[in-house]
Every structure is written in structure tokens, then in C-alpha cells.
Amino acid sequence: MGYRRLFSRHPIAIAAFLVLAAAAMAVAGADEGDPPGRVARLSDAEGSVSLQPAGVQDWAAAAPNRPLTTGDKLWTDQNSRAELDLGSAAIRLGSTTGFSFLNLDDRMAQMNVTAGTAIVHVRDMGENQAFEIDTPNIALTLQAPGDYRVEVNEAGDTTLVAVSNGQAEASATGQTIPIGTQQAVTFTGTDQVSADASSVGAPDALDQWSMDREHQEEQAQAQASQYVPPDMAGAEQLNQYGSWSSVPEYGSVWTPNDVGPGWAPYQDGRWVWISPWGWTWVDNAPWGFAPFHYGRWANAGGRWFWVPGPRHVRHVYAPALVAWVGTPGGVATTVAVGAGVAAVAWFALGPREVYVPGYHVSPAYVRNVNVSNTTIVNNTYITNVYENKVTNITYVNQHAPGAITAVSRSTFVSAQPVRGHTVAIAPAELGRMRPVGAAPAIAPERQSVLGSVAGRDVHRPPAAFSNRPVVARVAPPPAPVSFAKQQEAIRANGGRPLAGPQLATIQERVPTSRVRVVTPGPVHSLPAVRSAPAPSLQQRERALQATPVPPPQNAVRGDRPPGAQRSAAPPESSSNRESGRPIPQAHPLPQAHPLPRARPLPEARPLPEAHPLPEAHPLPEAHPPQDRTIEPEAPRAVTPPSAAPAPRIESPRPGSPQAHPAAPPGAARPAPERRPPPPPARAEERRSNPPDRPNNRQDRPNNRP
């Protein structure tokens, strides 16, 4: 009676709890051989970005919306960058960066950076989730949500780790070093690794691009999370390219804005082969990831809209949520469209319809991939459809206008674009068609894996980058089986993808030499890190300009009159030219008026009458002393560095100027003491203020006789 009352009061909460419990049981019961429930989406590729799919040796141009999984490698060439979306994390690569996934499943995202720069932003780290970044000399374990930047130099012997916010641990040779928020550590060496701590500096162009992308995606994800799970890859594009509305039969639905008349889902893209799922749809639309790997499509009134799965259930990735079209009997999944021409046809699954994987999985996986992507009546119905116990299935989109798309088998296998290569199906043939749940049993070719643009102007990384050994803390799975071996086994398996045990039988038993697993050593905390960021170039320039510079040996002193100062001949400088002073020469002065005995020199304090200023060098053809007209002071002779100084006469009182006795003609003058000088008067000032005018110098005494 109590249970009935509880259910009557809270029917919605109880129903939601049962759905979550069923999904949790499905995940818990998943077989170890099942494919992972998540992939990485190539969400942005700018410049030249190349892809090497797992198991092949060739490179192809990387296309947006391509799912990436264990063993896939990326290379961003010069002036290029890329972004990968994991839903709960974003990975952004700078130019000349080698990146790959050593392991990507439901619990572990183990990344490998052999060269270049990778920025990893962890939005959410759920229970039992792990993130690891492996480089040639360290293994970095991310321990909390945050922003982590990893740089590897070209030689592969230096790794810089910068943590803007978050917490990480770096494992190297016998040591483990914690790295916290606003810390940066440079690890140098491979056999013996040394660590040098610093702080995170100012962001560069890659940091700014990453922050801008993250800000936009966070805003878009916040809006989309009202309708889809918060960690669904590709959901951040939905608000920009479509609109949400409510339909009574299905609830919240999303409609794309940029599709033309006659458009239908799964028509603008191509089919590629990605192990272990097999045939996988890659859409061309910028929003074309989430609506083609999660949820269902419906048509009403000639309008297509996408119906997401339950918002509070963890979604599971599917390669393509479609039903295939075959001939009566349900064995073949190709249809005849002309004389001797075989075609492959499909249409989008509708709400509440069961997705049947074309690859070997456990019953728990089948329940999980359906419960998380649409509303199913019960698990028994899912199992019956998967085991082909239910044959009279009516698909809601089978008869929708333009829903069925068909291409030739060669177009399908060679990963050619569907748009522009569709084939028409005769009405009589349409009447004979029968929907089939599983994907067609067609073995892939080399082009199926690489795509139709393989080898066309594709930039490849240097061999040293792609084959460089790395250090790992967690042992990754064995290297992917080569595609040549897989192709042979797939053909023997009737064109179906290989299950986990089948792949294990052809797996190379030789352990990979590219990964060196290190055991975490004792934790060594580095010395205290500077609290302030490293100064920028502009800050360093300002500091240099503010630093006092000692005066040079030939600087003019400020404690002596300019006429009493002598120094070695300085080199010509901009200050000499700007001040108007002629450059001193080491030869006798030209003819000039003699200075009066009792008159002090310009710019100097008067000397006592008892100690008149000694005569300077006698000048040839000097004017008689009766001529009181004084011209501006001419340049004075400068003593060469090798000349011996003359004896100096001490001043009679402290603070008074010191003078030198007259030297014989041709003798060199002594060098003055080095003291800070006042700025010398310009030649223009001396001409405008002649020294014999008292009104220009109020403190000048009148010594006229």
C-alpha cells in the first residue's frame, strides 16, 4: 500500500529513476569486448590538418565531424590548428603538433603528444574518469577539471607543462612531481629528467584562441544542456544552426535552419569505415555530429526535426542511427537500380525505433545504445528486435518524402560524397524493398578508411615526430591491427566488422617499443614558485630605462666651472650634436679674446680677489686687456690621454672652485676629477646672454674697475 501511494504521488520521479537504473545496469553489464561508448569529434580544422587512421600507414586530409578513436593520429602543419571535442573535455592543437590517442574508451582518455603544443580543457571529470597526456619524457596525469598546456620541443627531450587552473602529476624516471594552479614546470632530458619550476606567463595567440573557443562553447553548451546531456559532443553547435521547439508527441525537438527544400537526414556526407564499428556516417554540415550519432529523426508536415534522447541518461555513441533497405528475405542490403547496378540505400530511424548494430556486441550494449538515445517501451522489445524475433516492423520514416537515399556500391565503398552521387530507385523496386536493421555486409577498401581525398596535397609529419617513443604511466592497449590484416579477416567474416576476440587472434604479439611505462615514484615537491608571472618584454624595457646608469669617465662634472673641466676626447654622440657644442680637438686653440684677470668665468661662482683665476694658455695675437668686449668662449684644448697632468692648486676654502696654474705653451692640461655635472649651456644661450651683461646674471658681482 505504501509503494502504491509513493508512486501515485511521484510518478514522474519514479519513472525517471527506473530509466536511470536500467541504463546503469546496462552499462554495468556491458561486455569487455564491446566498443567504447564515446569518441572524439574533430570539431575544427584550420589550415593543413592531416589524419592517419588507426592501422594504416598513409595520411589523408582530416575532415570536420570525423570520429576519432584509439590509434588515430593527427598532424597540424605550419600555421594550422585543430580542435577535438570529447564532450567532457576539449583538446586544441597548435601548429606543427603531432597528436594521437593511445587509448580512448568510456573511462580513459590517454593522449600522446610527440611534438608541438596541446591545450586540454577538462570541463568535467566524472567518477572513474581518467585523463593522461604522454610525451617523450613524462606522463602527465590530470587530477581535476582545469586548463593544461603541454609543449614538446622538436628534439623531443624537453616538455613544458603549464597549469592555468587545476591539478596534475608528472611522472618521469623514478619521480612524481605535483603541478598546481598557476604553475609551470620544464622537464629536460629523457634518461635522466630534471625539472625546473616557474609560473605561468602571459597568454599567447594559441591561449587566446583556446579561451575564445571555450567561452563560446560554454555559452552554447549552457543553452543546449536544457535539452541534451551536458557532455554530448557536438551539441554546442545546435543553437547556432537551428532552433528548439516542443512537439506534443515527442517533447523538445530541434530543427535545422540552413537546409533547403527536399532535404532529408543522412544525405549530405559520406560513409567511411572506422574500426570497430564498421560503416560510419560523416556529415558535412557544421552541426552534423550530434544529430547523426545520438537521438532520432522525425518528419511532420514536410519538416524534419531531431528528437534527442533522455537528458539525464548518459548517451552512447552510434556510428549511424539508420535503417537499411534490402530485398525481400532481409539477407542482402543492396537493391537493384538498373541493369547489373547494385545500390546501397538507407533512411533515418524514428523515435522509439530500435537501432540494430552491424557489429558484434553484447545484449547489454544493445540496450544501452538504444535506451540512451530514444524512449523505448521496454528492454524485452529491444532484445527481440536485435535477435530478429520481430519482423513486422513499421518504420515511421520509411514512407516520408525523400527519406530513402541510395548510392551505387562503388560510391559507398570509396567514401565518395553522397550529394551529387545518388541514384534513383524505380517505384516498382521501392514496393519490393524491405527494411533491414543491420548495416550492409560489405568489406571495406583502402579508400573506405582514408576517404576520397587521400594523398592529395596532404602534409605529413617528419618521421621522427610520428615514430617517437613516449613515456606512459598507464599501459595502453596494444597497437592497432594493420588494416591489411583486418581487411583479410573481414572478408573471411562475410564483410562484417571483427569482434574483440577476433581482433585479438590477429593482434601482433610483439609489444610496442614506442611506449615506455614508468612506475610512479616518490612525490617530490619543487621549490616555491614565484607568485608573480614572468615579466613581459615591455616590462623589462621599462625596468631597464628606470635603472640609474653611472656616469662615464669622461662625464662633465657639476661641481666645477665648465672652463675648469678637462677630459679625454669623447667620441661624437647625439648629445654633442644636439647641444650645439663643438667636438673638442687636441690642437691649440684659434685666436680668441683673453679673459680678464679679475672677471670670473661664466657659469661659475666668483673667486676671492686674493686668489685670481690663473691665466689660461697664452693665445697668439691676443687683444690688449683694455678691450673689455668679451666674445663667447671658444672651444678649449683637450689633453690627450697620454699627457701627464699638471699640479693642482687647492682652493683656499671648502666649496670654492679649484683652478690650475697656467701651463707652458703646448703643454697638456690635467684631466678633471669625475663628478656629476650640470647640463652645459648651449651655444645659442651663450650668444643670447653674453657674460658681460649683469642683468642676465643677477648674482654676478660688479668687478669692473
Image: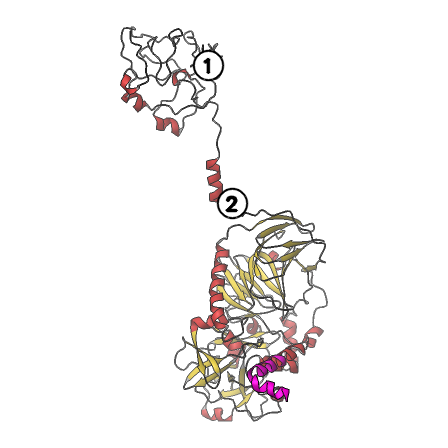
Q: Nearer the viewer, residue 40 or 183?
A: 183
Q: Which residue is mark 1?
A: 654
Q: Position of residue 320 (x, y in %)?
A: 54, 78
Q: Nearer the viewer, residue 629 or 194?
A: 629
Q: How is the image coloured?
A: secondary structure
Q: Is residue 325 visible?
A: yes
Q: Earlier in the sequence, mark 2 or mark 1?
A: 2
Q: Position of residue 364 (x, y in %)?
A: 65, 81
**For this view, does 495 lie left or right of residue 637?**
right
Q: Nearer the viewer, residue 591 or 128?
A: 128
Q: Position of residue 266 (x, y in %)?
A: 48, 79
Q: Which residue is mark 2?
A: 535
Please say whether residue 403 is one of the residues in the magenta stretch.
Answer: no
Above or below, 430 relative to 611: below
Residue for point 54% across, 47% down: 532
What predominant SS class does the magenta segment belong to? helix
Q: Position of residue 186 (x, y in %)?
A: 61, 50
